[in-house]
Image (cartoon, grey):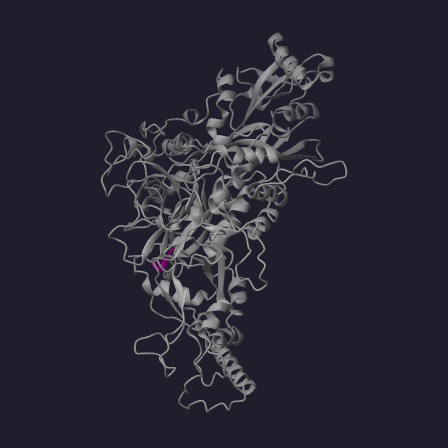
Amino acid sequence: MGFPFYAPLEPWIVDIMNEREDNPHMAMFRNPFVVLTSGALVTKANANVVSGNQTERVAQIQEALKSGKGYKGCIISNNINNLDLSYSTNETIVGVDFEGTYIKVKGETGRKVSTPIIESVDVDTDGANNTLKTAKVTVRCFTLKQFEMFELFFMKPGMNVLVEWGDSSLLKSDTVNRLHPNAPQTEKKNRNTYSTGEKLPITALKSPEECLVHKNENYDAFCNNFSDYYRSDTAAIAKYIHKKEQSNGTYDLVAGKVLDYSFSIDQDGTYVCNIEVSQGNQISLAVPHSARTAKSKDGRTPKQPDTEFTKYEQIINRILIDFNLDSIKFNKMLAPHPEEKGDWADDFFNFVKINKEQKDTVASDVPYVSVRFILHVLLNYVLQGGGIDTEFFKLGSQEWKDENNKTVKAIPVTSNKWMISSTDDVIYPRKGLPVIKAPVKNSDGKNPEEAPDDVDIVESASNDCRIGTSIKYDFHISEKLILPKLGPEETEKPDGPYKQFIGPTPEYNADECIGNALNIFIKYETVVKAWKSTYTRIEFLEKILSILNNNSYGLFMLIYGCQRENTPPTVIDYKLAPDSIKVQNTDVTYRFKPTTLKSIVKSFSFNLEMSNLVAGRTVFNSGKFLTALKAKHPGAMGHQELPPDAYKAVDNSTFGNADGWYSINNVELKKIEKNWEEAIKESDASNGTVTKAENSPPETTTEATDFPGIIKSKSKVFLIDEKDNKNLKTLIYTDKQLIQDVITKSTQSKSNKKPVPTPIAITLTIDGFSGFSPGQYFNVDGIPEIYNTTGVFQIMNTKHNISKDGWVTTLEADWKVVNKK
């Protein structure tokens, strides 16, 4: 899976990194802080509060607050100058509520103890495809009663907690002057906007208090607006990024729910509490994708009534059973269809196939479902009921406008006119699907001049292989689609950053096309298997996208990402993503400098995971290539050269150096060549032929005479129209190499900025900074320059640790090979 964007560090981040290099002495003034806030309402109600039902209990607890016996929330900080809090000499204090009232432990006096101390915070933005952001907070309580009170606010399952941290000294840095109206600067940019188009001026904050979420006598607003601190809609993301830039990267937060907690008792009698807070905005894809259906008393799924169902109803019932879904929730997801043309019947292909009388029928009976059904229905099924914010968590496809200004749901992907499936995992329904042809023979059995001497793939405009009845699903898009603007600030110029045209344009050659991934059909059995083998929505989505990407011939790469910056993520084709969220054509990429005197890098490590490479080399053996050669040329092999693909196992040119020195693994090469020669000899011997000497000229290989048989054996045909039993169409041809070769040959050579993954990873630690995001990239000095000239390091994960030793940020990055200008 990829990332929502792939871009260099923002200019303001580079400014601050450069300033840190120029002013290393500023490090001694850094003063990190942590603020832990709970929105819990804690009151002392009468003894019978536990005896009523839930509604009565909640009402009694709320009513008790009016008598003054309670607290509105709890705020704890590790950086306070109030002696009453840092060294209590009377009643033990837990924290401060939103009204400034000390939260005191009743019945415990005369003990000189501090309020609970925040010892450390560890923040991780990893999780499933970086969709989770978690904070692990360690707090020390000093008495049992203090711990009991602390537990009410912070150690309850599902409690909403806000963790804020930062560095108050860095706000006083000279970097803030770059935002002053009279300061020299290259350009002011209002990068972040609300969804309404309202601009957010980048004005520097002057104190840590301006960064923090307001808490002074604002308890109700805090509770009502808590979701604003974490929601992943356009406005919330813009506010969040805007505040981090205003604070010069010295402030960050995690707002979410308490998922895990534990405590231990030290020998000195203090309580060490561990709390894990998971960011609520990112739980959308982490929630379970399936809810179990009701079971009968014997534990079995209830039987359907003995009724005769229509074909569509039979399909729906099969899906309910295979996916173990609740019929009421599922039926809500089936309406309305995104195309507004009735039910989803056309999104199910080859289901309930009628058995033919003839025993030798060749039509496939394998059922398929559309990607549209998978994304719009299955992935959103769990959102029905259960009190989940459906609109917020819903995963959908992009909305475009056609030339008639009509809204079209689509996931545009790069394609090619020769596109045809080579595996039964997917089908590309198309009007004009290519046809596989055998060589044309003259009466003497030989091919005419310029005629193919092998199986060929040809165009056929009349070959209508679209799927559907009321809706004719065609993988290729014939009309031009335009990406709508988000707001009035977006330019309408053709070369503007937000104006995207998808469809037939002069920039594409005759063979290049645009497809709609929603119209791809995936094998039903494969989808069911993916559903049952995963637990969360993101895991299921990753498997579906992996199936599609593995069968794209490298033309498209679907990721869960953003169509543009600061927008909620969806499914997009990375290759068609705008430059604003891909590699930018910048002349200078920021470089960390771990080896210089002014280095801001505290630690650096470089790691090459060889396990995948070693495992991959076992694929490149003589048996693999010999099998492929036999399939193409039946009979004796004679003298055959080692296929070019075999050299991939020994070619280490990617890991050369910047001075032009490269290497190959000659030991492995000799081994592969020897195995190949021995395999050829064994093959020839089994066919009763005598192998020529190694230097003998190659003989003409035996020509396959049954080309129609070869085509038939590799073709998977389907009955497109059930009313026409003769309307059999080849939708799958299992010779992937044939299709790959013709697509590769026809694809126009372009400068492609798609990063190529490698097994190289680095870990880099600097003083605390909140501006980094997974997906951004940089270079590093002090390592072999080949890694900087041929690629970049893309941030895969950011971690923060705030402890008594200060605030440090750790970047985990993978090296990606990128074609640079």
> Residue 581 occupies which quadrant of the picture?
top left
Tell me which residue sits at (53%, 33%) in the image: 280
Q: Viewer-proximal residue, 648 or 664?
A: 648
Please tell me which residue is depicted at 33% across the width and 50% down the height of the picture: 589
Q: x, y (%) of residue 122?
A: 54, 39
Viewer-proximal residue among 678 and 638 = 638
- Is residue 789 in the magenta section? yes
Question: How many numbered marks does the figure carry?
Answer: 0
Q: Is residue 41 left or right of residue 646?
A: right
Report whether 727 appears left or right of 179.
right
Q: Is residue 607 visible?
A: no
Magenta highlight on residue 605:
no
Task: Name the magenta segment's main secondary structure.
Answer: helix
- Quadrant of the rendered image containing residue 443: bottom left
Side (left or right) of 654 relative to 160: left
Of the pair 117 and 236, the residue shown nearer to us: 236
Residue 570 in sight in this render = yes
